[in-house]
Image (cartoon, rainbow, N blue to C red):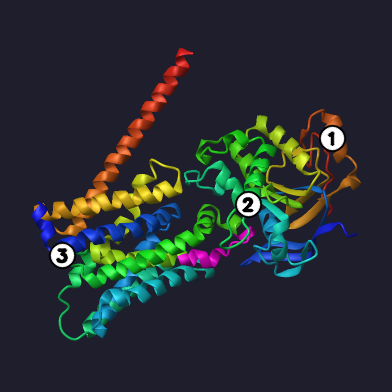
Amino acid sequence: MNDIIVDFKNVFFSYGDRIILEDISFSVRQNDFIALIGPNGGGKTTVLKIILGLLKPEKGIVSVFGGKPEENRKLIGYLPQSFLFDLNFPINVFETVIMGRYHGLLKKYSESDKKAAIDALSTVGMLEYMNHHISMLSGGQLQRVLIARAIVREPELLLLDEPMSSVDPASQKSIYELFHELNKKMAIIFVTHDIGAISSYIDRVFCLNRKLYYHGPGEGSLGKLAEAYNCPVEILAHGIPHRVLERHKK
Amino acid sequence: MIEVFQYEFMRNALIAAVLVNIACGIVGTYVVINKIVFISGGISHAAFGGIGLGYFLGINPIITAVPFSLVSAVAIGFIGKRSKLSEDTAIGIIWATGMALGIIFINLAPGYAPDLFSYLFGNILTISLTDLYIMIILDFAIILIVALFYKEFFSISFDEEFSIVVGIPVRILYMVILCMVALSVVILIRVVGIILVIALLTIPASICSQFTYNIKKLMVGSVVVGIISTVAGLFISYLLNIASGASIVILLVLIFTVSFFIKNVLNSLTRRRHSRSITIE
């Protein structure tokens, strides 16, 4: 079981009196592709921030790459929610991406950092925009740039917080395909509050609403969804008309 | 008009206009892009406590204002980020505390405080050689800090959380930014006074931010706009015989208004041309 990269055991978290996470346990393996879904305020972003060591759980054990979360941030790529950005900030696409190659105080970005940024931009198909200011990009293009920033250090785990918000449906498909490519090299956890669209490339679905409900390969059907719908993006729901995921056990 | 340069106070004033705006252009850029205008307002008013302390101890109030504004910068940063109080509340508390302490110190100080008004409203014509030396030192400190941590400040200002994740010591460097604001506030007090400090920290950078998306150009542009408006404002105050601090600020506001209209007219023109070219197609 050495390929476990993230391990949550009985994790609790709350803001003041409001319980956000209650007794959450799960593990993530190398090259997993996990969707974390659930309503707003269900604790999805909190889980990502605990993995990054930005928040500390009240109870429970969290191990990331076998150590404390804050010790292994180097191995993690992170895409925060995009509505948090000030699009008028004076920064262009290249400057945004190279930020991900930060090495430490007083250390300049090297030629290999610049090359890595260019490679990451060409991976996400945004190289020709490298000198554009971020306000000139569409929602989907900005997401690609932020994905490039997240993968520029060649992480082993990619955390994506609502990567599909502000992306129009036509571009969503190609971004899912990009994730599928990236998934060959790294594990991916991606958060969405929208249970509508979920890629069939996903191995497991975690439904989070304070407690975690797990839908894994045991349900058998996830991998076959692409065949069933003949399209990589599906509508999955917990109910009618197409029940794909089982009901949560009480 | 050339004859004014014969006077030492006028030469000092012009040198001060350059020195002050070097600090303001650089730090003001961070103030504007970090949206910490009112934190800067809080720090500048709190610095009044330091001015009062200077009167009380009988030393140059600018020297006592340095530690006072640094402490209030750190206090606002600390209360705002680490406690349950919002940054907004922290600003209000520190702002009022500094002002109140200043008034108490001046009450306790022996005698009358004759040039108190020049600290509140500024008077660029009373700048002494000592003030110029203090300005040079603080300018160097600010330039050195920005040269060393440019990359980090840039990253923190854009995306604080991502900066933590890539390993930047965000909390400490955010405090450093606030301390630079504190230092430039001290430099500015002599020129425009505590009450108008916020103008030179905010308006030049916001004028330039309408025309460039490059942070280095923004800094250089803010320095230039600041110097031009300080010198021009000084001459206007000389000609009309009004307070220099206020005339500098009003001139800045006029430049801002004109630039805002130019920018928006330019925008709507290019948009119209664009839509016309689409209809032709």
Helix, strand, or loop for circle 3? helix
Quarter of the figure with residue A126: top right
Q: Which mark is residue B9?
A: 3
Cα distance between the residues tagged 3 and 2: 50 Å
Cα distance between the residues tagged 1 and 3: 81 Å
Residue A72 position within the rendered picture, expressed as x and y whole percent measured from the top left: 72, 62
Residue A60 position within the rendered picture, expressed as x and y whole percent measured from the top left: 76, 68
| Disc on the earlier residue, 1 or 2 | 2
Circle 1 is placed at which residue position?
A225
Three-letter code for the amino acid on which mark 2 is drawn:
Gly
Q: Given the image, what chain letter belongs to the residue carrying mark 2? A: A
Q: Is B172 colored magenta in this rendering?
A: yes
Three-letter code for the amino acid on which mark 1 is drawn:
Leu
Q: Given the image, what chain letter belongs to the residue carrying mark 1? A: A
The residue segment tinted magenta is B164-176
Image: B100 above or below B141: below
Q: Which mark is residue A100?
A: 2
Q: Is A10 colored magenta in this rendering?
A: no
Residue in front for this viewpoint, B76 or A186: A186
